[in-house]
Image (cartoon, helix red, strand yellow):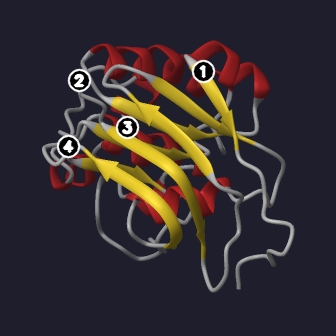
Amino acid sequence: MSVLEVEALVAGWRQPAIRPISFCLEPGEILALTGPNGAGKSTLLMALAGIGQIFSGRCVKNPKARLGFLTQARPPIAGLPLSGKELLALTQASPAGLPPWLSNCLDQRLDRLSGGQRQYLALWSVLQTPAELLFLDEPANHLDQAGIAHLRPALRQRAKAGAGILLVSHAPDFLRDCCDRAIAVEPCPCSNPRP
C-alpha cells in the first residue's frame, strides 16, 4: 500500500499556487519535488502536511503512517536552554549513527551550535523519529560537504527501513545521488507569492 497518494491536487495559500499534480509515494522510496524557486514545492509540502490549503484534487495518506516534517523555518533558539541531547529525546530520535563532529556536541545548548550543526541536528531528529512518512524541505541547506556526505547514506538507510520520503532541494547533485525519482512542480499562471 502506498504511504501517500496525490491525485490532481491543487494547493496554495489564499489562492492556488501550483498546477494539478499527481503521484504516489511508496514505502522505501525517496521522491524529489523539483522546479524553479517560487514554483510551489514548499507550498505543496505544507498543504500535504495540513498546513497549507488544498483547493482541489485528492490526498490520501496511509492512516497508519506517522508524519515527520522538516520545514525551512526554524524557531528562534536564542536564550533557549535546550541541548542537542534534549532535542533528540523530545523527538524520540536516537543519537546512534550521528557523525562525530555532531555527536560530540550533544551536551551543548542549541544556541551555542553553528548553523550547520543546528540544521543537521534538526534534520537528524526528523530522520530518526518513529514515522513512516517524511517530508524534508531543503534538507541540505546550511550543510557543509561533510554534512551532505553523511546525509546521503542516512536518507538511504531510512528509506531502506521502510519510510517514504518526499523532499525538496535545489541541489541537482544531491537529488541525483539520493532520490529514486523526481516530480516537477509547476506554478499556477495566476498565482502570487505566499504572503
Q: Label 4 is placed on what type of residue? A: Ala
Amino acid tagged 1: Arg
- Which mark is nearer the camera, 4 or 3? 4
Which residue is at a point 32% across and 50% down the rendered structure image?
Answer: 60
Question: Which quadrant of the view contains residue 73?
Answer: bottom right
- Residue 117 locus on image (x, y percent): 51, 43
| Residue underneath mark 3 | 124
- Alpha-carbon span between mark 3 and mark 2: 10 Å
Q: CA distance from mark 1 to mark 2?
A: 28 Å
Give the residue pinned by disc 4: 65
Which one is closest to the eye, mark 3 or mark 2? 3
Do the numbered discs 3 and 1 sit on residues whose CB atoms are within 8 Å?
no
CA–CA distance in space, label 4 to label 3: 19 Å
The amino acid marked with disc number 2 is: Ala
Q: Amino acid at mark 3?
A: Trp
The residue to which callout 2 is attached is 96
Q: Position of residue 151 (x, y in %)?
A: 50, 24
Q: CA distance from mark 4 to mark 1?
A: 21 Å
- State which tag comes first along the sequence, 3 or 1: 3
Question: Which mark is first along the chain, 1 or 4?
Answer: 4
Above or below, 2 against 174 in this view is: below
Q: Nearer the viewer, residue 97 or 177?
A: 177
Above or below residue 37? Residue 184 is: above
Q: Which mark is residue 181?
A: 1
Mark closer to the observer (2, 4): 4
Which label's residue is closer to the chain start, 1 or 2?
2
Q: Earlier in the sequence, mark 2 or mark 4?
A: 4
